[in-house]
Amino acid sequence: MNIKRLIAMASVTVAAAASLAGCGESSTGADPVSTAPEAASPAAAGNGIACSQAGDLTATPDLKPPADVPMVPGGQIYLAKGPFGKTELFFLWKDADPTNLDAVRDEAADVLAKAGYTIERKDQEEGSEAEAHLSGPHDVAIQVIQLCEGKVRIKYNIS
């Protein structure tokens, strides 16, 4: 992936995050972005909050990922945002050991690699997050963090 493409992806991601910050309210009057699991800080997530505090993990979003972007086995999509231009965000939870985020990241990246995607790079912040960036029919960035006790959150940023 060339540097222009990486900069474009980063710009879209920043724009998407900024636009989410102004989203509407939920029926409880709370801001769904600030209370949603993707907004939880890694420090808060590292505390192993109760899953009942992590938001509606049973939701079934109307927005579906592209058919040529296979998701990690055992993952449940509970939130989808977009499109923001060509970018869509999908949030999945999966039962997994939150102390081994890189293993979940590797599993998610390997599923995409088997579907023809190229793993461009991987990185991780030990105990906080693990990420992978892939290219193929779409550019895909994967981020894995702890969501709640016994579950991790996998975010797919697809453009």
Image (tube, helix red, strand yellow):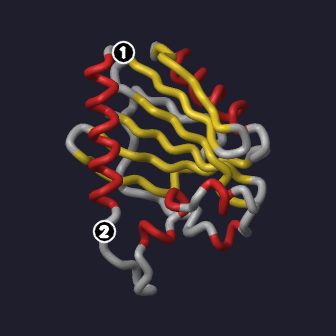
Q: Secondary structure at mark 2?
A: loop
Q: Quadrant of the C terminus?
A: top left
Q: Quadrant of the N terminus?
A: top left
Mark 1 crowd level (few <14, some 14–19, many ≥20, 10 Å Cα): some
Give me the disc on residue 23. 2
Q: Taking 59 as reference, is 82 above or below it?
A: above
The amino acid on which the numbered mark 2 sits, given as a three-letter code, is: Cys
Count of labels in the image? 2
Q: Secondary structure at mark 1?
A: loop
Residue nearest the viewer, comparing 76 with 52? 52
Q: Is residue 126 left or right of residue 30?
A: right
Residue at the spot 73% in from the left edge and 69% down from the top edge: 50
Q: Position of residue 104 (x, y in %)?
A: 68, 35
Residue at the spot 60% in from the left edge and 21% down from the top edge: 110
Residue picked out by circle 1: 1
Q: Taking 110 as reference, is 46 above or below it?
A: below
Q: Is residue 33 left or right of residue 142?
A: left
Q: Taking 99 as reference, is 20 above or below it?
A: below
The amino acid on which the numbered mark 1 sits, given as a three-letter code, is: Met
Residue at the spot 72% in from the left edge and 31% down from the top edge: 103
